[in-house]
Each structure stands twice: as C-alpha cells, then as structure tokens.
Image (cartoon, rainbow, N blue to C red):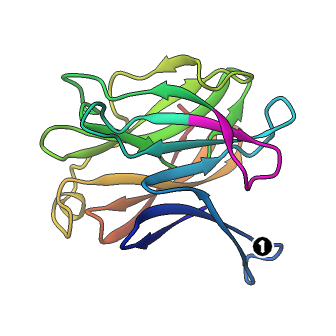
Amino acid sequence: TYCAVSPRGVCTCLATSNDLQRFQKRGIIFPPDNKDVVLFPRQIGGRFAALHRPSASHFAAPSMWVAFSHDTLNWGDHHFVMEPRPDSWDSVRIGCGPHPVFTPEGWIQFYHGANESNRYSSGTVVFDLDQPWKIRRRDSDPFLFPHEDYEIRGFMPHVVFCTGLIERGGDVIDLYYGAADDKICGVSTKMP
C-alpha cells in the first residue's frame, strides 16, 4: 500500500508485484483522507484484512480501524480498533507501522503515537487472531522514543516512526523506522 496525495486529499492505493521490481498499480483502496494502511500477512476467516486510519473530524481523534476484503481492492466490514489515550505518549493520534506479526498469542502490531507536543514514539499492541478489532494487550509505555540527536533534530524534530520489519527467526526482528522525518534507521531487537 502507498499514499497518493493530490489537491483532493490523501488516498491509500495498492500496487502489486511478483518480483519487487515491476509493479502494477491497482488503484485507490481507501478514499481521502485515509492513511497508515497495512495488510495482514495472512487471511483471517477466509478474507484479507487491513488496518487503517481514517482522518478524524473535529468529533474524534485519528484512530485505528480494521476492514476486510475478498479481493484486496474492495473493502468493508469496518470495525473500530483503538484510539489515542489521554495523558499518554499516544494521546493525540495513532497509526499503524509495519505489517502485523502472527504469533500464537495474537497479532503483534507496532504502531506510532503522538502526544500534545507532537512527539512521535512507537509502541506495541496485540490483537486477537480471529477478531483483530479486539485488543489482548496494549503496552502503556513506548518501546522506541526519540532520544538520539538524529531523532530529535531534523525536518520533524522528536519523531521516531516504525515503517518496516523483517522476521529473522525465533524472536529476533529487524525493525526499520524514520527519524525526524528525514532519516531511515534500523535496529535489531527481540519480539516484545
């Protein structure tokens, strides 16, 4: 999935590839303004699933939802998943990071959150395997937060933003993240 930006808003589009060198653009899958869309790596109940964050109106904060599809192009059966938490590191907005990771405990999702100071950190949440709108565990503290100079200074100061991961086997992952919105960083760590 990727964001497409125009004067009409930010849409999420889908591109597919068999070799990661040639891509077929499949079009808009979530209309404006919706972003932070990630696909689950396995079907759930015979359907594809995606986490997404529609832009909120003045009635609600940017929150996470899950939707389902039979073909990855047409999405429906939306369920509210979670929202920002008052007086927390993720108190103003939240959004998805890399794809959810399947574990026997549930789907582990690395997500970002911002507070009133626009400081972005990353935390984890565990969703139910069959009903991913049900939260099994949501950590109260971020596992990754801006503290290095290259995370604090830059285009968007005080930002760390998980964007990709590689499962190395066992409980080791390589996690990739943006720092200050102008750098790409990586860290190897154990699965939370």
At 35% from the left edge and 39% from the top edge, which residue is drawn? 62
Pick the front one: 86 or 191: 86
Q: Which residue reaches farthest bottom?
A: 22
Q: In the rendered view, does 93 fall on the left or right side of 164?
A: left
Quarter of the image containing the N terminus? bottom right
Residue 11: say if magenta: no
Q: In the rendered view, does 174 fall on the left or right side of 32?
A: right
- Which percent across, then down, holds residue 138? 45, 21
Residue type beneath disc 1: Ser
Locate residue 86: give its quadrant: top left
Locate residue 44: give its quadrant: top right
Q: In the rendered view, does 74 fall on the left or right side of 11?
A: right
The magenta stretch is 66-77
Pick the front one: 164 or 72: 72
Q: Which residue reaches farthest front?
A: 8
At 51% from the left edge and 26% from the top edge, which residue is drawn? 81
User: What residue would you read off at disc 1?
Assistant: 17
Mark 1 secondary-structure assignment: loop
- Which percent across, then down, holds residue 154? 19, 68
Locate residue 25: give its quadrant: bottom right
Q: How many marks?
A: 1
- Which percent across, then down, holds residue 59? 27, 31
Pick the front one: 185 or 53: 53
Residue 68: say if magenta: yes
In this picture, is 172 found above or below 32? above
